[in-house]
């Protein structure tokens, strides 16, 4: 069927993906498929953010 091809080629900008952002530095950690565009927050692998995530003062 041609429908699948049209969907793929039409998905250049409107990706229905949830973006996982680092809540400390705001960098993009990854994406997960969601129903609609959403944002999630996690902690990236960088050392300052890992330190903050541990709650160390
Ligand atoms: Zn970070």
Image (cartoon, helix red, strand yellow):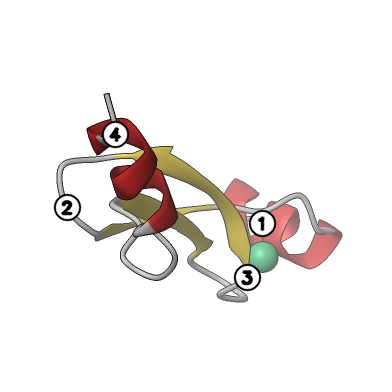
Tell me which corner region of the image, top left, top right, bottom left or bottom right, holds residue 14: bottom left
* 21 shown above or below 54: below
The residue indicated by pointer 1 is 56
Between discs 2 and 4, the one toward the N terminus: 4
Report the label total.
4
Residue 36, disc: 2
Considering every residue shown, the one lying at the far bottom of the view is 25
Dot 1: few (<14), some (14–19), or many (≥20) neighbours within 10 Å? few
At horizontal 40% and vertical 45% (from top left) the residue drawn is: 8
Residue 2, disc: 4
Foreground: disc 3 or disc 1: 3
State the SS at label 3: loop
Between discs 3 and 1, the one toward the N terminus: 3
Nearer to us in this view, 50 or 42: 42
The residue indicated by pointer 3 is 27
Foreground: disc 2 or disc 4: 4
The response on whether ligand 1 sits within 8 Å of label 3 is: yes
| Side (left or right) of 32 relative to 43 | left
Between discs 1 and 4, the one toward the N terminus: 4
Foreground: disc 1 or disc 4: 4
The N terminus, quarter of image: top left
Nearer to us in this view, 1 or 45: 1
Between discs 4 and 3, the one toward the N terminus: 4
The response on whether ligand 1 sits within 8 Å of label 4 is: no
Q: Find residue 5 and report its horizontal and vertical position in percent.
A: 38, 39
State the SS at label 1: loop
């Amino acid at each position: 069927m041609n429908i699948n091809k049209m969907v793929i080629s039409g998905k250049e900008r409107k990706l229905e993906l949830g973006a996982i952002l680092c809540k400390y530095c705001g960098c993009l950690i990854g994406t997960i498929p969601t129903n609609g565009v959403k944002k999630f927050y996690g902690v990236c692998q960088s050392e300052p953010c890992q330190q903050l995530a541990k709650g160390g003062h």
